Image: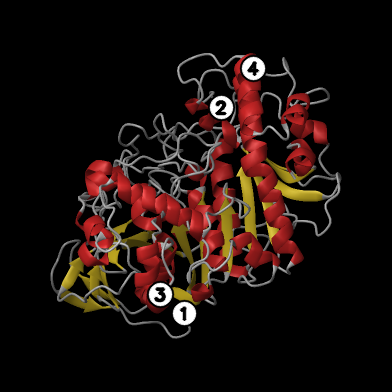
Amino acid sequence: MILRRAAAPMRLSAMAGGPGATGRGSTGQGSTRLAGMLLPLFLAAAVLCGACDGGRGGSAEPPGGLRAVPAPVAATTGGEVRGVVAGDVVSFYGIPYAAAPVGNLRWRAPVPPAPWQGVRDGSVRGHPCPQTDALAAAASEDCLFVNVTAPTAAVAAAGVTSTGGSTGASATASVTARTGEVRRPVLVWIHGGGFAAGSANEVDMSALAAGGPAVLVGVNYRLGALGQLALPALTTESGGDAGSYAVADIIAALRWVRDNAAAFGGDPGNITIFGESAGSVNVCAVLAAPSARGLVQRAVMQSGPCLWPFPAMAAAERTGEAFAAQLGCTDPATVLGCLRATPVERVLDMGGQADVLTSPRWAPVTGSLTLPRPPAEAIAEGAADRVPVIVGTVRDEGRAFTANFDPGQELTAERFTQIVREQMPDKADAVLAAYPLGAVPPRERLAQVITDRLFACPTARSADLFTRTGSRVYGYEFDVPGLTPVIAGVNPGATHTAELPYLFPAGSSGSPTSSGPAGFAAGPSAGPSLTPDQRDLSAAMIDYWTRFAAAGDPNAASSTGPLPAWPSWPVTRTPTSPDRLVLQPGTIEAGAGYAAAHHCEIWG
């Protein structure tokens, strides 16, 4: 693998495909998940490992051939839970951090779960939250769980009890905490999925936990209308806190992490939240939420900028009233009882987002107690948590999202022009000039517009906001040049979600790899299909992310040795100032000219 420190800032032509190219030339996005025919605004990859079925009920015991080892029992605030050991890590799945939001708790703020008696089996994953995606069959409203994966040594040092087998019911030995043992940084994963799909069960957190070493926590949160419905009646009932139940769930999970991190060998004073796509946007929402102040010490936002507009309360309430009317709940006096009695299947049938260029029907609502103002506004005014931040994108995010435009057909030049003039009439002439006919196929042109308008340029502006208010910011851009096109009509390279399998390599716990249910693509695994450069890139990314979690700086010293220096985001951007780390198999180096490469003079 070539790990290059750029002697001079990268030439723009190296990123833009050379003179005359309209964007990024023939290299770009990757193949992970291409979800259905109605693609949510922020599509999340399902990086399913072989031992992680995306739904519930699958045991997480080590696969055949692995040596049986004592299964630790951790004492949490809700009760004891027994983990399952695989290789160098131990995992505790399906731990409730809030009560099931069912019945009268539907569309209410999360409340603590009831404690349990005895030892809870942590080898079985909890349900995904209700959704219409590939995880729908396993979903349930009883879904507010976390998964925890930690190095076995860290858990042992926390002084947990061990049992004599992976399913034993009684403690046979105690592990004594070692005086002076260093607590590990905690990374809390917030999955993506357009605010309407996904689950914490979709990723194998073992590589990050072992590589840090660190404690990893994955969070389930309410989705779609169940997580983001606003109505005047809900606003009145809650005292002004409707529409951001999903964000409130994540904040409740962070409180659980703070209160329980030490039980797994983690440091409750060193918590990093990281998320991708809609999960990244939720990261930004958490930073801006007054009730989350002090819970987070670092943040990583992958392919989901803070600059995306959040619906304001008045508009969200109008959407909610139309939704209630669709379900036949029109009487203001009984609307909440009517909605809470509606079967969840009917709630999910009411539709969502048509394509990535239209606003999502369901997203976190601002103007509530949880989110009083848009996150970008809170950051700009210094009202958000000021923490070190990593922000970044895949070089060509938009390729997967073009699937919703003329699906199964060739997208013509005329159709591209029509989409541009309909969706962005005030910028249409400038867009058509910047992305000219003939430079790349029309579908690739559309992909570039989606990338630059919705991801790259808002990410650059988000980095500017954080930097101006005193946060240290590190940008990145990920690509896998030459990767098989995710859809006909686009160029080879990486697409939205393509970086996730490098952070969450399938089979990293020693489990066999699998492509998972229909609609999900297998990510890089520990198997022989990976090239040495891909393996090295995955290892480097895990190292950067966990160094950042430990010290707030991805350049921090590590026992794994030096990596190419990651430049911080410049306070004042220039065409030649290093502004990001370019992450590709075979090449890791500083890059410059991010805004110019993505035509941010058009998009702002």
Q: 232 or 65: which is nearer to us?
A: 232
For label 1, the crowd category at 10 Å Cα-Cα, with few meaning under 14, some 14 to 19 and many 20 or more, is few
Mark 3 residue type? Gly
Which one is earlier in the sequence, the residue at label 2 or at label 1? Answer: 1
Give the residue number, with chain letter if any, for mark 3.
239
Q: Nearer the viewer, mark 3 or mark 2?
A: 3
Identify the element where label 3 is drawn.
loop
Q: Is residue 226 left or right of residue 118?
A: right
Q: 15 or 43: which is nearer to us?
A: 43
Which residue is rendered at x = 76% and y = 38% of the image? Answer: 602
Q: CA distance from mark 4 to mark 2?
A: 17 Å
Q: CA distance from mark 1 to mark 3?
A: 45 Å
Identify the element where label 4 is drawn.
loop
Q: Find residue 593 and report its horizontal and vertical position in percent.
A: 80, 42
For label 2, the crowd category at 10 Å Cα-Cα, with few meaning under 14, some 14 to 19 and many 20 or more, is some
Which residue is rendered at x = 48% and y = 84% of the image? Answer: 180
Give the residue number, with chain letter if any, for mark 2.
483
Which one is earlier in the sequence, the residue at label 3 or at label 4? Answer: 3
Q: Is residue 24 left or right of residue 243?
A: right
Quadrant of the rendered structure where residue 464 is? bottom right
Identify the element where label 1 is drawn.
loop
Q: CA distance from mark 1 to mark 4?
A: 57 Å
Number of the label disc, if any, that sits on residue 161 = none
Mark 4 residue type? Pro
Number of the label disc, if any, that sits on residue 441 = 4
Q: Find residue 296 and report its horizontal and vertical position in percent.
A: 53, 71
Which one is earlier in the sequence, the residue at label 1 or at label 4? Answer: 1
Q: CA distance from mark 3 to mark 4?
A: 52 Å
Mark 1 residue type? Glu
Q: Nearer the viewer, mark 1 or mark 4?
A: 4
